Amino acid sequence: MWDVTTTRFRKQSAVRSSSEKMNRRLSTEEAARSKAWSLRNGAPGTLLERLSRSQKRCRPISTLVARLSTHGAAIIQRPSQFASSPKRSCPKFDVPTPNGPVACPAKDLTSFAKTFTGVLGVSAVHLETGEQVAYNSDHPLLTASTFKSILLVSLLEMVDVQKLSLDDRITFTATKRVAGSGVLKLMRSDTEVSIGDLAVLMITISDNTASQMLFDVVGHDRIQHTIDRLGLTRTRIPLSPKEMLLGIVGLDASMGPVAFDLSMERLLNREYDFESRAYSSEGNISTPADMCRLFRRIHNNEVLSCESKRTFLDIHKGQQLRTVIPHRLPAGTVCAHKTGQFELVSCDVGIVYSRHGPYAIALMANGARGDRIEVNAALAALSRRVFDEFNGPEA
C-alpha cells in the first residue's frame, strides 16, 4: 500500500543525502583550491578568510597619493611592488579644499562632493542670468576626450579663414588606426572620409582614429593658438589622441604599427599605466571653469562665424554617449555636450538648453573609484542637481 508519509520521508532523505554529497564535494574542492592558493600565496584559509586578507592587501593602494604639481594636476605614484602589474594599481587622488562657496545656493552640492571618491570639479554658468554653481572649478584635472571640443574649434577656425573645407576628403589607412572608442579603425583601408564626417565621428562617438586624423590636419600650434584666443589659461593639450591613448596603457607611438594591436589587447585586459605621462600634469589638462568658458564663448558668438558656431553646436547635440549630463534630465531636454572617459577619469562638458534658459556645465572627476556605471550615475545625479538649481526641482 502506498504511504504518502513514508514516500515523502524517503524523498526528503534522498534530498538530504544528495545535499550532503554535494556539500562534501564542494568542501573537497574548496580544500583543493585552498591548498593551491596556499602554494601560490603562502597563506591557507577559507574563501572568506582569503577575501579578508585580499582586502587587507589592497589597503596599501591608499598610499598611492596624488601629489599636486605646480600646475595642480595629479601625478600618479605607484609602489614598486605593483610595478610588474600596472592594472592592479589604483591611485588615490587627494581631494583639495573647495575654492569657495557656491555662488547660487546649491545646498547639498558640497556635501555630495565630499562623499565622492577622488577629485571632483564642477562649474556651471547660466548663459542669460550669469548665475553660477562652482566646486573646485579652477582645479586642473585630466580632460580625457573632452579636449576634442577644443580641437573642433581649431578645425572650424581653419574653415572660417578658408584654409580647408568640411567637404575636403582624407584617406584612411591602417597605419592611422587608434585603439579605444570609435568605428573608423574597423573600416577598410584606403577609405576616403570627409573632414566634416570625421568631426561628427570625433564628437558624437569620440572616435579616436577620426580625432587623430583631424589632429594631424590642425596641429599642436593651432590648437595652442585656439586655447590662447579662448582665454583658457589653465588648459594645456600637449598630447594627441593617439599619444594619450597609448600612454594610458604604457605604450608610445615610436613602437610603430605593433602599438595598435598591443593597445587593443591592454585595453581589453584593463592594463593601465598610472605612471605614464597621460596620467600626469604633463597630460591633457583643463579646469571646469575653462571648459565652461569655452562653451560660453561659443554660445556668445565670440569665436566662430555664425555658420561654424551652428556646425559646432549641431555636432555636439548629436552626442551618442548620454550617460552623464543628460541622463537624468527631463525628457526632451536638448544638450550639446562632449564626454570623456578612461580609467579613473570621467568628464562631461557642454550646454544644456533648459526651460529657463541655457547654461554651460562642466563635470570633471579624476581618481573616481568604483564601476564606471556607478561613477557616471553619480555624475548624472549631480547634473540633475545643477539643473534644479537653475530651473527648480519641478521643472
Image (cartoon, grey):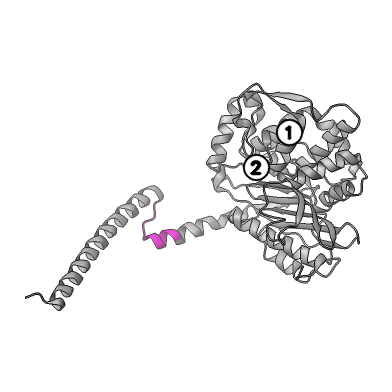
Label 1: few (<14), some or many (≥20) within 10 Å?
some
- Rendered location of residue 80, percent (x, y): 57, 45
Quadrant (top left/top right/bottom left/bottom right) for the C terminus:
bottom right
* Residue shown at 67% from the left, 32% from the top: 209
Q: Would you name the residue on which mark 2 appears?
A: 275
Is residue 391 part of the magenta span, yes or no?
no
Mark 2, secondary structure of its residue: loop
In the rendered image, the residue lying farthest to the front is 332
Q: Would you name the residue on which mark 1 appears?
A: 197
The front one of 332 and 89 is 332
Left or right of 55: which side holds 154?
A: right
For marks 2 and 1, give the one nearer the viewer. Answer: 1
- Rendered location of residue 336, percent (x, y): 77, 49
Mark 1, secondary structure of its residue: helix
For the residues labelled 2 and 1, the Cα–Cα distance comes to 35 Å
Residue 84 shows in the view: no
Amino acid carrying mark 2 in the image: Glu
* Residue shown at 64% from the left, 32% from the top: 184
Above/below status of 190 relative to 50? above
Left or right of 34: which side holds 156?
A: right
- Rendered location of residue 78, percent (x, y): 61, 47
Amino acid carrying mark 1 in the image: Asp
Residue 268 shows in the view: yes
Label 2: few (<14), some or many (≥20) within 10 Å?
many
Of the image marks 2 and 1, the number of the one nearer the N terminus: 1
* Residue shown at 68% from the left, 36% from the top: 208
Residue 225 sits in which quadrant? top right
- Rendered location of residue 28, percent (x, y): 26, 57
Residues in magenta? 42-51
In the rendered image, the residue lying farthest to the right is 302
